[in-house]
Amino acid sequence: MKQDNVNRFVTMARDYDEMAPYLVPQYNLLQESTIEYFNLEQLAQPVIVDLGAGSGIFLERILSRNKSALCYWVDSSPAFLDIAQQKLARYKNRVTFILSAMEAAWEQQMTHEPDFMFSMSAIHHLENEEKKELYQRCFELLAEKGWLVNIDEMKTIYDDAYYNSLLYWARHVDQSQSLILQDKRDLYFKWVDHFDRWKARNIANFNQPKTKGDDLHEVFTLQMQWLQEIGFVNVDIFLKYHLWCMVGGQKPAAFQKENTP
């Protein structure tokens, strides 16, 4: 990853942790819907991997509701690691922290076969071949009937609709300023400073080529096709809100794989 992108993620760690629930459209809905859809509160000791786990917001939701869940935090940012270790300190016996890029061999540090592999707002930074390779690795790692779910920024089918979804997020951030408490306004403006660069990359330079580490959005239907080609079943788009898509699939049981043409 380019050094300027590394620096960008380091400096935004605290800002993102505080501001994401306000400034990412339907952030809470996306996470809550995932927990509810897969009944994560009720499962007996599920093993869960969060790829690009950031400050640990999603894992904290899961661990606080399921008292037996075992989780893996995977991210490449030392700054996010510091925040996540503080946030998840009370669950330290049920969380393994793996500081690693998604493209690296983070799975070598795992000792449990995962039932669920989630990612939110991370995989879109990878190039397409890396996305597909990651999906393939997740398929191989998952337990039978395990799920991979990517909650991410994705293109829609048509460019004009995709562009409108980018504009929507920009408006959402502007309009959300009134919701920010006074003691968090400084964090809001720091987040907006990062987001201004996002707008420059994605809106002002909409048709310009991008490189790894940028926002390499890909059409959600194509990503669903990749999952099917890899061998996932029950592939679906479970939720879509403008730019944000919840796409995933299930690894079939052994007998299903043997009988698949």
Image: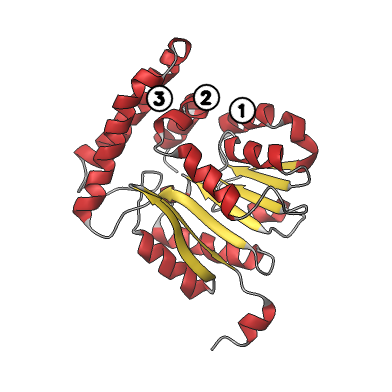
Residue 16 on image: x %, y %: 48, 29
State yes or no: discs 1 and 3 in contact (Cβ < 8 Å).
no
Helix, strand or loop status at disc 1: helix
Please identify the quarter of the rendering in which residue 143 is found: bottom right
Q: Is residue 206 above or below residue 219?
A: above
Q: Residues within 10 Å of mark 2 (few under 14, many from 20)?
A: some
Q: Which mark is residue 83?
A: 1
Q: Which mark is residue 191?
A: 3
Helix, strand or loop status at disc 3: helix
Q: CA distance from mark 3 to mark 2?
A: 9 Å
Pointer 2 residue: 14
Residue 90 on image: x %, y %: 76, 30
Q: Residues within 10 Å of mark 3 (few under 14, many from 20)?
A: many
Helix, strand or loop status at disc 2: helix
- Is residue 104 visible from the viewing direction of this image? no
Residue 23 vs residue 205, the one in the foreground: 23
**Which amino acid type corresponds to the residue marked 3 in the rendered image?**
Trp
- The structure residue drawn at horizontal position 69% and vertical position 32%, both measured from the top left corner, is 88
Residue 195 vs residue 255, the one in the foreground: 255
The tag earlier along the polypeptide, 2 or 1, is 2
Position of residue 96 in the picture relative to residue 79 (left or right): right
